[in-house]
Image (tube, rainbow, N blue to C red):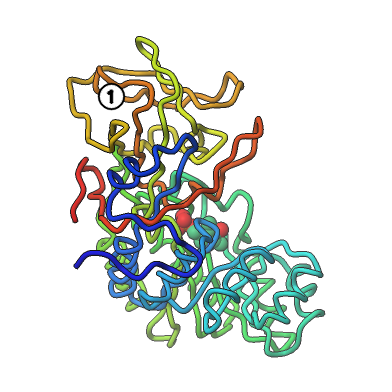
Amino acid sequence: MTGHAPARGVTDSFPSVAAFVAAERPESPVHLLRPRRLEALARDFVAGFPGDTLYAVKCNAHPLVLWTMHRAGIRHFDVASPMEIARVVECVPDGTMFYHHPAKTPGQIRLAWECGVRFFAVDCVPELEKVAALTDATMRPVVRLAIPKGSGAVYDLSTKFGAVPDVFEATLRRAAQMGLKPAVTFHVGSQCLDPAAFRLGIEMACASLDRTGIAIDWMDVGGGFPAYYRLTQAPPLSAYFEVIAQAHHELTAPRGIRLACEPGRALMAEGGSLLVRINLRKPDAVYLNDGIFGGLTETYWGKDQLSLPFRLLDAQGRLKNGPAGSFAAFGPTCDGNDKLPWPLDLPQDAAEGDYIEFNLIGAYGREMAARYNGMHSDRVAVIDADFAGHQAEEIV
Ligand SMILES: *Cc1c(COP(=O)(O)O)cnc(C)c1O
């Protein structure tokens, strides 16, 4: 099967990256989306996870991404801002939203409520009381538990959000006292390399439920499922699903708790790539048209943990595969820090006007790009062909 109907609002659809490069030779960076791959990945995830899969909109809020998630069967969305809420309302009117930001303004809460949001994350009593005061008894507080540091994730999210067990239990008790039906969530941290972190979260949540005697019907084990970058050493997603299913069976199933999760990265990373141009070649360095202040921001934070697979194309879109050398890679701004954290092994004949396609950047690529030095590209093109992760070839 080749091709798909062009998505609404996205007119630029190309059979392959080669065709796109040959047609346009873009001088600005381009975010490439592969809806076919995205849909397949999302379907696999939804089928494998032992509960409901929410999509964490922050990792890529492009309308085509939301439509594709919907096509893959996803009906629940984790949102954290008015913009993300508006995007879901517009693109997925039958979606259920979970406002999983634990520090909200009154205006944000009112707007979310008016847009039909009923699930609101809270990680302390004051936030719970704030949301409760602006909503009614049908509001579902989702109390967020912090997972101890060092539980296996590249990014620790519990230093910022999530309640320690005492506060978690106090917040659950207060919710019950107010006549609300609390649910529970946690986030083990993004790019979590150890499935056991999810079991730990479920165990901790269940221990708190035991201590408080509060019954819940919904537990969201968060995101954090990994994508498989060049140096990632993590078990396959199926191992995560097994650990979670086992913990659910042993610990939460007897209580009738429905499981959910809210991945971003694992659903989205392989669905998008970034096409950058070599603007200048020096003997052992390349100057690119995008860098750590643009679509490659996350590589700065993730360093080797987020080492992206890439390939070199010439200006006609043909793959260049010659003997490789190591090149420092600089971004386009005048900032001395604008350098990729890892050198690129590129064919020695890499030249100005060639393109590098970085793969696995569908999550946290376009969304994190700043406007430093007046440099920003929001150009998105749709590629029908697939891109096989680490292998530098296209499957059509
Ligand atoms: C960012 C975020 C996610 C998604 O995390 P991934 O590591 O991309 O799976 C899910 N839930 C919340 C609350 C988040 O902040």
Identity of the residue drawn at 21% across and 40% down:
392
How many marks overall? Answer: 1
Counting from the top left corner in percent of width and height, residue 31 is at 45, 48
Identity of the residue drawn at 26% across and 50% down:
387
- Can residue 277 be seen from the camera position used here? yes
Determine the residue located farthest toward the front in the rendered image: 23
Q: Is residue 185 left or right of residue 230?
A: right
Q: Is residue 245 left or right of residue 278?
A: left
Q: Is residue 151 left or right of residue 283?
A: right
Question: In the rendered view of the protein, which quadrant contains the N terminus?
Answer: bottom left
Residue placed most toward the observer, 285 or 304: 285
Counting from the top left corner in percent of width and height, residue 21 is at 34, 41
Judging by the rendered image, the residue that carries numbered circle 1 is: 346
Determine the image quadrant of residue 135: bottom right
Question: In the rendered view of the protein, which quadrant contains the C terminus?
Answer: bottom left
Q: Is residue 119 above or below residue 195?
A: below
Q: Amino acid at mark 1?
A: Leu
Q: Is residue 248 left or right of residue 62?
A: left
Secondary element at tag 1? strand
Q: Is residue 354 above or below residue 71?
A: above
Determine the image quadrant of residue 275: top left
